[in-house]
Image: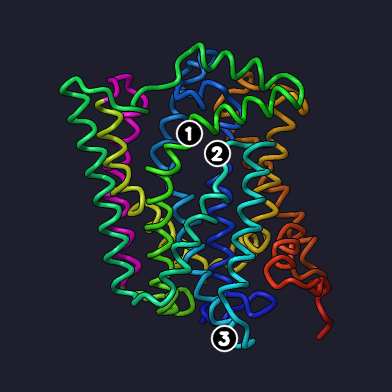
């Protein structure tokens, strides 16, 4: 039975494979924002207006955007239970160790946001991790109820914001940044390191409210679900009866909701519809993300090569996540080729697939004789406050 399969170090293959799958989806989504000042301003790139360009935008928004970071967040919460178990086996005090880990994540995220990509998620995980640390003893049922309640309240808040916008009230963040903002971003991103960092700092100041009010609670909800299922060991022994139900909900209700979300994002119908779309997205994106995870969990036992293909980059997810931003920055900004807003949406997706394929090959090569990726090694050193053993001991 596939649930008994383990990666080196008693890792759960399913967790690593899901993490690798999420990493691919995150890159396909993020590359559009890394490669375009217009997308960061909430607008389509004006130079690419073909049917294929629009088809890719709609597809990515409907089937990928806001799904894979939720899957990654779920795994972040799930992994907390694995770390708790590991600390208990070692007889190590968990809180100081985990706080050092969160501090390391926050510093990495801050450097990532300033130097490479303002859409960084690591700093958000670090802040959410503080809440998870406080709630680590929560009962699984309570964690699920809290996650559902938090998501429902946030969705209701966006629906109320849409009503307020209908009544003529100004709703901060309801509109896009505008063409002037996009042009200014493109000019700076094509410049030298100082201009690029200046633009990243500007973008961070613009999206901090989005991080606190939208992404932070959504990440926390997904982490709580991961924490709940981790306490039940759900990925060690998946509930085969539940997986088809998750698929049915995700591929019906989830897809329908995401179709509306994509329409609200790209139809040009204004702030009210965008706010309603965000409200629907909050409820239905987790359903579609769960359907993806359930599908993968059902397929991977029959596709061991695919499992291994995804698990290796998943084991080095932190290194690969930062590496993706570095590679894309070298392609799109003045750090390298400065091709910002000069690559079409379909070409961006092809680049993303090529980058992930390269990372999968490099990850397999790296992990042949090593336990951790380079950034994972650094974070582990900060977490345990000692130099980790890097080489795999021969059996």
Q: Residues within 10 Å of mark 3 (few under 14, many from 20)?
A: few
Labelled pair 3, 1 in contact (Cβ < 8 Å): no
Please give the residue where the numbered disc 2 appears in the rendered image: 119
Q: Residue furthest left?
A: 167
User: Is residue 318 shown in magenta?
Assistant: no
Q: Whole-Å distance between the Cαs marked 3 and 1?
A: 39 Å
Residue underneath mark 1: 207
Q: Position of residue 299 (x, y in %)?
A: 48, 65
Helix, strand or loop under label 2: loop
Please report the residue visible at 74 percent of the width from the left and 54 percent of the height from the top.
Answer: 361
Residue 120's x, y, as percent?
A: 57, 43
Q: Which sits earlier in the primary sequence, circle 2 or circle 1? A: 2
- Is residue 171 left or right of 226 when viewed as pictured? left
Which residue: 62% across, 60% down?
314
Looking at the image, tell me whether mark 3 or mark 2 is earlier in sequence order.
Answer: 3
Determine the secondary structure under disc 1.
helix
Q: Quadrant of residue 58 in the image?
A: top left
Q: Which residue is mark 3?
A: 88
Q: State the image quarter where residue 340 is shown.
A: top right
| Residue density around tag 2, few if under 14, some if 14–19, many if 20 or more, within 10 Å | many
Q: Position of residue 209 (x, y in %)?
A: 42, 37
* Magenta part of the chain: 242-271
């Amino acid at each position: 039975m596939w649930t008994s399969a383990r990666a080196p170090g008693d890792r759960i293959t399913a967790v690593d494979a899901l993490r690798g799958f999420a990493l691919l989806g995150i890159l396909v989504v993020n590359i559009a924002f890394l490669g375009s000042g217009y997308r960061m301003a909430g607008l389509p790139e004006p130079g690419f207006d073909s049917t294929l360009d629009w088809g890719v935008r709609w597809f990515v928004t409907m089937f990928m955007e806001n799904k894979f970071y939720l899957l990654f967040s779920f795994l972040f919460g799930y992994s907390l239970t694995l770390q708790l178990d590991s600390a208990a086996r070692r007889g190590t005090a968990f809180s100081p160790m985990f706080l050092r880990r969160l501090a390391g994540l926050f510093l990495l995220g801050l450097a990532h946001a300033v130097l490479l990509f303002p859409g960084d998620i690591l700093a958000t995980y670090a802040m959410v991790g503080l809440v998870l640390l406080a709630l680590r003893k929560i009962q699984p049922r309570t964690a699920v109820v809290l996650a559902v309640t938090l998501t429902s309240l946030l969705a209701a808040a966006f629906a109320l914001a849409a009503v307020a916008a209908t009544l003529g009230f100004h709703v901060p963040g309801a509109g896009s940044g505008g063409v002037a903002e996009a042009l200014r971003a493109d000019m700076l991103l094509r410049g030298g390191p100082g201009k690029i960092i200046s633009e990243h700092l500007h973008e961070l100041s613009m999206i901090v409210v989005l991080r606190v009010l939208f992404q932070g609670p959504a990440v926390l909800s997904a982490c709580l679900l991961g924490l709940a299922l981790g306490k039940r060991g759900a990925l060690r022994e998946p509930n085969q009866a539940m997986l088809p139900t998750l698929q049915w909900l995700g591929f019906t209700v989830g897809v329908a909701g995401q179709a509306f979300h994509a329409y609200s994002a790209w139809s040009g119908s204004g702030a009210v519809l965008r706010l309603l779309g965000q409200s629907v997205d909050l409820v239905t994106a987790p359903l579609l993300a769960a359907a993806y995870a359930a599908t993968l969990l059902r397929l991977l036992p029959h596709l061991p090569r695919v499992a291994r293909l995804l698990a290796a980059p998943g084991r080095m997810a932190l290194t690969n996540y930062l590496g993706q931003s570095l590679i894309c920055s070298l392609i799109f900004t003045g750090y390298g080729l400065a091709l910002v807003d000069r690559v079409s949406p379909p070409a961006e997706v092809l680049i993303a697939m090529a980058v992930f394929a390269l990372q999968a090959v490099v990850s397999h090569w790296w992990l042949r004789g090593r336990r951790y990726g380079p950034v994972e090694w650094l974070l582990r050193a900060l977490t345990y406050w000692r130099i980790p053993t890097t080489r795999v001991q021969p059996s």
